[in-house]
Image (cartoon, rainbow, N blue to C red):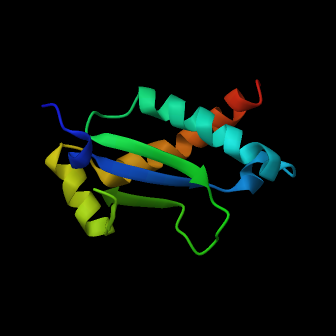
Amino acid sequence: MTLTQDKKITVIFRIEPGCLGPDGRSHVAAFCQLASNQLAESAPEFMNWRIEPRLDKTLPELAYALQSRPLSREHATRYFAYFGEQIDHFEVDLLNRLPDLIDQYFGR
């Protein structure tokens, strides 16, 4: 099934500059671009990514939206289930990929 962009869920993943080390603020924008490209390559076809720095600590690290409107976790869970995916599994996999993306960014 091919979905139009307005029907795809957007995963908003906010990256803490501190996870990139003491100079993280100077790297976080470039890292977000690299992470966005890497994650988009392996994303299910029902999903879009928005990777951005988490400069405002009041915003969640992970959020979901549909047609630019925020989705509750409950609605996002149902959206994932519709496509045969478990949101908990997706989130664990995403967080487990973060160290590899950081290593790739720094060329380790």
Q: Is residue 80 above or below residue 2?
A: below
Q: Residue at x 48, y 34 (%)?
A: 39
Q: Quadrant of the N terminus?
A: top left
Q: Position of residue 83 (x, y in %)?
A: 18, 43
Q: Quadrant of the C terminus?
A: top right
Image quadrant where residue 99 sits: top right
Q: Is residue 60 above or below residue 67?
A: below
Q: Position of residue 88 (x, y in %)?
A: 36, 54
Q: Residue at x 76, y 24 (%)?
A: 107
Q: Position of residue 2 (x, y in %)?
A: 16, 31
Foreground: 18 or 37? 37
Q: Residue furthest bottom?
A: 58
Q: Is residue 53 left or right of residue 45?
A: right
Q: Is residue 101 left or right of residue 67?
A: right
Q: Position of residue 98 (x, y in %)?
A: 60, 42
Q: Is residue 108 above or below residue 25?
A: above
Foreground: 29 or 14? 29
Q: Is residue 26 left or right of residue 67?
A: right
Q: Residue at x 15, y 49 (%)?
A: 82
Foreground: 86 or 43? 43
Q: Residue furthest right?
A: 22
Q: Residue at x 20, y 39 (%)?
A: 4
Q: How many marks?
A: 0
